[in-house]
Image: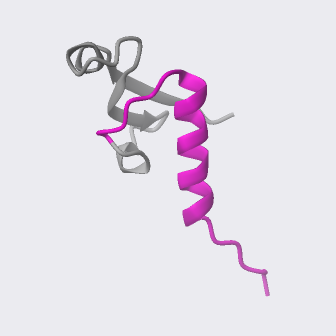
Amino acid sequence: MWHINAQLDWEMGERAGAGGTFQVIELKDDEENDLTDLVDQGRHFHSIVELKQAVLLAIAGRLEITEAA
């Protein structure tokens, strides 16, 4: 299992008139690798599930699989 720790900003959504949403401040995995660049930090997310989908799409877009020789 791969675990990503998300530091979220709920206050910005409130100030922007989008109460109940959050923006991502930082994403780090179990080994403290910074994964924040996987999401648009200006985007307002409605749920962790929505954030997870965005992260998965970003990873899929960068994933390359090659055949072993």
Membership of 34 in magenta stretch: no
Q: Quadrant of the N terminus?
A: top right
At which x and y percent is residue 21? 40, 19
Q: Residue at x 27, y 13 (%)?
A: 14
Q: Residue at x 37, y 22 (%)?
A: 22
Residue occupying image coordinates x 41% and y 12%: 20
* Region of the chain picked out in magenta, as a range: 41-69
Please, which residue is most extreme toward the bottom here?
A: 69
Res 9 → quadrant: top left
* Quarter-of-image position of residue 11: top left
Give me the residue at 41% from left, 45% from top: 39
Name the side, left or right, on which 49 lies relative to 14. Answer: right
Residue 17 percent location from the top left of the image? 27, 17
Q: Is residue 7 left or right of residue 54?
A: left
Q: How many marks?
A: 0
Compared to residue 39, the image places residue 26 above or below, namely: above
Q: Looking at the picture, how far across and down is residue 19, in whole percent?
A: 35, 12
Q: Residue furthest front?
A: 17
The C terminus is located in which quarter? Answer: bottom right
Above or below residue 44? Residue 33 is below
- Quarter occupied by residue 60: bottom right
